[in-house]
Image: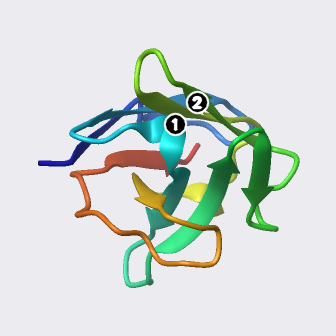
Amino acid sequence: QVQFVESGGDLVQPGGSLRLSCAASGMNVSIYVMGWYRQAPGKQRDMVALINGARTLYADSVKGRFTISRDNAKNTIYLQMNRLKPEDTAVYYCNARRNVGTAPIFGWGQGTQVTVAS
């Protein structure tokens, strides 16, 4: 059974930084396109960042501020978030795709709450 456990969310002031972690079990993060997604209240869940081998892809809203990375030995992916803005407030999730252009394929974890407020 595939499970994702997201952690690292917190309340942070605008301009601050956070590092999110997603520990995966039941699957190998190295063979999938791994990604971070977020869902703000009343909105749909959107892709934030993808990592496909050595290549990364970001939503325009986070480009230059967020960095996705992967530790295959720990079967974990990370999201370093810098220069956070109030509009980054959301629950953050991770998941896997078979290809960049396809949808996430596993069930969603609990997510981790990121709140950006002064």
Residue extending farthest to the front is 31
**How far apart are the alpha carbons under marks 2 and 1?**
8 Å
Total numbered labels: 2
Q: How is the image coloured?
A: rainbow
- Vertical placement of residue 20 versus 53, above or below: above
- Give the quadrant of the C terminus: top right
Q: Are marks 2 and 1 in contact (CB under 8 Å)?
A: yes
Q: Is any atom of residue 104 visible in this view?
A: yes
Snapshot quadrant of residue 28: top left
| Residue drawn where x is 63% and y is 78% of the image | 101
Q: Check disc 1 and report its element: helix, strand or loop.
A: helix
Q: Is any atom of residue 91 visible in this view?
A: no
With 37 as the anchor, is 28 left or right in this view? left
Disc on res. 22:
none
Residue extending farthest to the top is 73
Identify residue for label 2: 70
With 46 as the anchor, is 57 left or right in this view? right
Snapshot quadrant of residue 78: top right
Disc on res. 30:
1
Residue 104 locus on image (x, y percent): 42, 69
With 43 as the anchor, is 111 left or right in this view? left
Q: Check disc 2 and report its element: helix, strand or loop.
A: strand
At label 2, counting other C-alpha atoms closer than 10 Å, the crowd grade (few under 14, some 14-19, many 20 or more) is: many
| Residue drawn where x is 67% and y is 50% of the image | 52
Residue 106 locus on image (x, y percent): 28, 63
Q: Amino acid at mark 2?
A: Arg
Q: Amino acid at mark 1?
A: Ser
Residue 68 locus on image (x, y percent): 66, 39
Residue 49 locus on image (x, y percent): 65, 55
- Vertical placement of residue 52 versus 82, above or below: below
Of residues 105 and 67, the one drawn nearer to the viewer in this rendering: 105
